[in-house]
Image (spheres, rainbow, N blue to C red):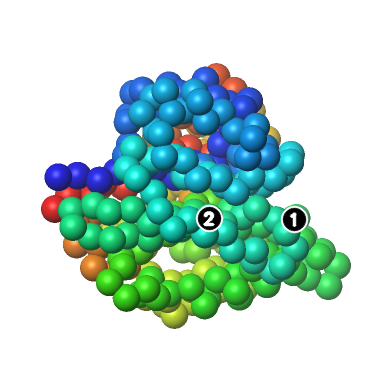
Amino acid sequence: MTLSITTWNINSVRLRLPIVEDFLRQTSPDILCLQEIKCQNDQFPAEQIAALGYTNIVLHGQKGYHGVAICSRLPLTEDHRQDYCGVGDSRHISAVFEWAGRRIRLHNFYVPAGGDEPNREINPKFGHKLDFIAEMKALSADGEPGTASVLVGDLNIAPLEHDVWSHKQMLKIVSHTPVETEGLLEIMRQGNWVDLMRQHVPDSEKLYTWWSYRAKDWAAANKGRRLDHIWSSADLAPLLRRVDILKEARGWNQPSDHVPVTATFDI
């Protein structure tokens, strides 16, 4: 009995609905988590996605910005939306589902990008990102009795040396600065989260999920970053069969700059 969960920053679900539909037809994960849907709840293409079997949908949308969604073949209950930093942004949603006799809480995050300058004194966006990360440290993988946890999303931080194309050149670039990477690793340590993407891939191996639109030939340059993540509580980690990064999706028609990442579990 398998369970597959995909995370994908889609960068406007209405604009990129054709590639979402193609992905669901071809890959058929049990659950699809989207970030940056960039629409209000009533504008989300729920009917089209439900027609492909994803009839259980929970949303936290926002006009023109941010927004997260969970689209599932499995029933979803107890959905919750957390307003991190109290600014009203739609950056988190969670819901509970049942699989293989387990109760699982699934969190879907879109962490602020943080702007271009890694200095909160002159760049409020960077300060917002750091505050968001600080609040996430309170989220524990073991926070609900009798409930396992999965956390996915665009966390906008590449925490390890080989999560970026050049560790040395990226140390002063937002998404890989020490204050960000240390903050994200502290969330994992403090919350007892397991980094599933690195469970079967050694830290010494390059691993990317995002390639900039700015590169004329993104594939040839291959200056990627691992900004998208899948974590779990320790009890689920031994059940992980594999994690697939669909790099080819970066070359699809009107692509997102992020690609789908899918974790497959097996009892």
Q: Which callout, 1 or 2, points at the residue further toward the start of the chain?
A: 2
139 horizontally vs 234: left or right:
right
In the rendering, at what x and y percent does residue 264 appear? 26, 46
Indicate whether 104 appears above or below 243. Answer: below
- Report the residue marked by disc 2: 93
User: For the N terminus, which image quadrant?
Assistant: top left
Q: How many marks?
A: 2
Kind of residue indicated by mark 1: Gly
Which residue is drawn at the image coordinates 50% and 25% (left, top)?
47
In the rendering, at what x and y percent does residue 147 appear? 31, 68
Q: Label 2 near label 1: C-beta < 8 Å? A: no
Q: Nearer the viewer, residue 110 or 142?
A: 142
40 horizontally vs 200: left or right:
right
Q: Nearer the viewer, residue 168 or 105?
A: 105
Indicate whether 267 appears above or below 254. Answer: below
Q: Nearer the viewer, residue 38 or 195?
A: 38
